[in-house]
Image (cartoon, grey):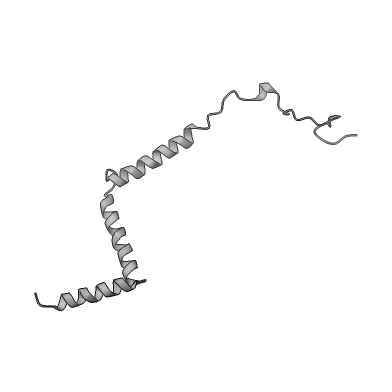
Amino acid sequence: LKTSFWPRSPRPTLQPIMAKDDLVPYVNTWFWPSFTLVGASSLCFGVYIGKITNSHEWKEIFLDYCHHKRTVHSPNPLDKIARGIMSVLKIAPK
């Protein structure tokens, strides 16, 4: 009594198990990935040119944040010198 589901063939073959009639003729695998890519890039471009949201404010906020991080947390020697000169110029009479 055999209990396996698939009968063993006398010699192994590399042919597919499914019959040709069971296969679908065409599977659309390009539409949704390309639609997602076009949609996401269009959204990013719309934000960039300012049509979807005011992206210029976001750019200014981001630049202010980067400048703050650069000057406060990891100042290099040239930044220290420039801040010293600017503080001297600030108290100098006009």
Position above or below: 61 against 43: below
Identity of the residue drawn at 75% across and 30% down: 14
Identity of the residue drawn at 67% across and 21% down: 21
Task: Work out whether residue 51 or residue 93 is closer to the camera in this orientation and state it.
Answer: 93
**Most distant residue in the left direction:** 94
In the rendered image, the quadrant that contains the C terminus is bottom left
Determine which quarter of the picture holds residue 41: top left
Residue 84 image offset from top left, x and y in percent:
24, 76
Residue 36 image offset from top left, x and y in percent:
44, 38
How many numbered callouts?
0
Residue 59 image offset from top left, x and y in percent:
29, 55
Determine which quarter of the picture holds residue 64: bottom left
Q: Is residue 58 left or right of residue 24?
A: left
Q: Is residue 19 left or right of residue 49?
A: right
Identity of the residue drawn at 59% across and 23% down: 25
Identity of the residue drawn at 48% across and 35% down: 32
**Most distant residue in the top direction:** 21
Position above or below: 65 against 93: above
In the rendered image, the quadrant that contains the N terminus is top right
Task: Work out whether residue 28 or residue 63 is closer to the camera in this orientation and state it.
Answer: 63
Position above or below: 87 against 24: below
Task: Work out whether residue 45 or residue 6 is closer to the camera in this orientation and state it.
Answer: 45
